[in-house]
Image: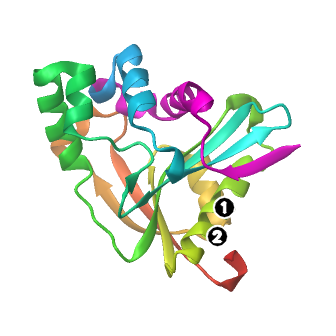
Amino acid sequence: MVSIRKGLPAAQHPAAARLYWEAFGAKLGTVMGPDDRALAYLARVIRADHCFTAQSADGTLLGIAGFKSPLGSFAGGGPADLRVIYGRFGAYWRSLVLEALLDDVDNRRFLIDGIAVTHAARGQGIGTALVAALCAEGRARGYPEIRLEVIDSNWRARALYKRLGFVATHTARLGLLRPFFGFTAAITMVRPLTEADA
């Protein structure tokens, strides 16, 4: 039995940080690493009110899906958080690189801020259930569409999103930022939200 819940219990913040880093560390390692600092940063900044979780019957965290809102994002943080974990200089160059990567603002679509499922729980429909929860949340908030970014090399995720009705609308190549990240381009995918998502 797997349950999808809105929010994240405080006791699961470290597990959520580990799961998120397992999913995205290979892409963000140069900027957010080393691992211990990345985990400390994520545990500090993740917002329990900006996610859905998939949990087993015994309460084990199996998956997490973050989202963004005008009030913030699941794994955002800011310059002050970077300074606490990485120091003044480390925070300075990281904030410049991240700002260049994350300078997009979209007030018309509900924005997904990462989906991660544990290796052991993949192939059980958990990713699909988390996307459904995000779509319902976006619809409840009055958005006409939902949007996510997926890296070009993540064929498995792209296939899932396509199967769930997402359509690729844009590809952003990293260009000069390429040495900082473990991917070459990010693909924007969008899906309309309908009454069936409520």
Q: Looking at the picture, tell me which residue is in the foreground, 38 or 142.
A: 142
Q: Is residue 71 above or below residue 47?
A: below
Could you tell me how far apart the alpha carbons at marks 1 and 2 are, in whole angstroms?
5 Å
Q: Are marks 1 and 2 in contact (CB under 8 Å)?
A: yes
Q: Main secondary structure of the magenta part?
A: helix
Q: Amino acid at mark 2?
A: Ala
Residue at 45% in and 39% down: 46
Say which residue label 2 marks: 136
Say which residue label 1 marks: 133
Q: Is residue 117 found inside the magenta-colored segment of the image? A: no
Q: Amino acid at mark 1?
A: Ala
- Give the SS element for disc 2: helix
Residue at 50% in and 82% down: 144
- Give the SS element for disc 1: helix
Residue at 23% in and 42% down: 98
Residue 130, image quadrant: bottom right
Q: Is residue 87 above or below residue 194?
A: above
